[in-house]
Image (cartoon, rainbow, N blue to C red):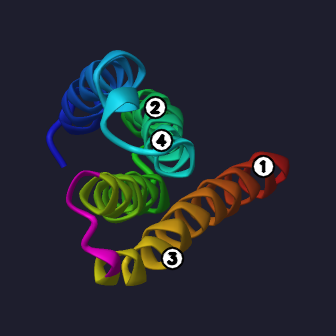
Amino acid sequence: MQQNYFLMIGSLSGMLAVMLGAFGAHGLEKLVDAKMLQRFHTGVEYQFYHSLALLIINIFYNQVKNKLINYAGHAFTLGIVLFSGSLYVYVLTGYKSIVAVTPVGGASFIIGWALVFIAALNSFNSEKI
């Protein structure tokens, strides 16, 4: 992994989350109903949380060089694309079949957080030795 790979992805994703959030708040509310707007907002919210997580992943990886941290970053990136991306596509196009991908993105987020936990646990255990 390049030294600032997740810094670049996280910052770009964060910027896009702000832009999409503004679009949802100021342009989309006139085009879709409240339930669809809430779905869009959920995509933005999870994208933003995990964009910040990618920035933190970049810091941790550069300090400890743990492959689990690297895998977590990839899981978060995949989660953003699948979870948030599928919600955006559904809201903007009405293509309902795409929501079958949303749980896979959610699982990617869960796996990413589990990998961070395991990496932290491994680090904690190795410090006691």
Spatial separation of the CA atoms under disc 4 and disc 2 = 16 Å
Report the mark closest to the observer, 1 or 3. Answer: 3
Tags 1 and 4 in contact by the CB under 8 Å rule?
A: no
Give the foreground label among 1 and 4. 4
Q: Tell me how far mark 1 sits from mark 4, CA to CA.
A: 42 Å
Magenta span of residues? 92-96
Q: Earlier in the sequence, mark 3 or mark 4?
A: 4
- Number of residues whose C-alpha sits closer than 10 Å to that of mark 1, classed few (under 14), some (14–19) or many (20 or more): few
Q: CA distance from mark 1 to mark 3?
A: 31 Å
Label 4: which secondary element: helix
The x and y percentages for residue 112 are 53, 61
Residue farthest to the left, as pictured:
2
Q: Is residue 60 magenta?
A: no
Quick check: 73 above or below 61?
below
Per the image, the residue denoted by label 1 is: 124
How many numbered circles does the render carry?
Answer: 4
Nearest to N terminus: mark 1 or mark 3: 3
Residue holding disc 3: 103
The answer to which quarter of the image holds residue 117 is bottom right
Q: Amino acid at mark 1?
A: Phe
Asked whether disc 2 touches disc 3, contact meaning CB atoms under 8 Å apart, the reply is no
**Residue named by callout 4:** 37
Q: Main secondary structure of the magenta part?
A: helix
Q: Residue at x 19, y 28 (%)?
A: 8
User: Viewer-proximal residue, 11 or 127?
Assistant: 11
**Label at residue 48:** 2
Percent x, y of residue 126:
72, 55
Q: Earlier in the sequence, mark 1 or mark 4?
A: 4
Quadrant position of the C terminus in the picture? bottom right
Q: CA distance from mark 2 to mark 3?
A: 18 Å
Q: Disc 3 marks which amino acid?
A: Pro
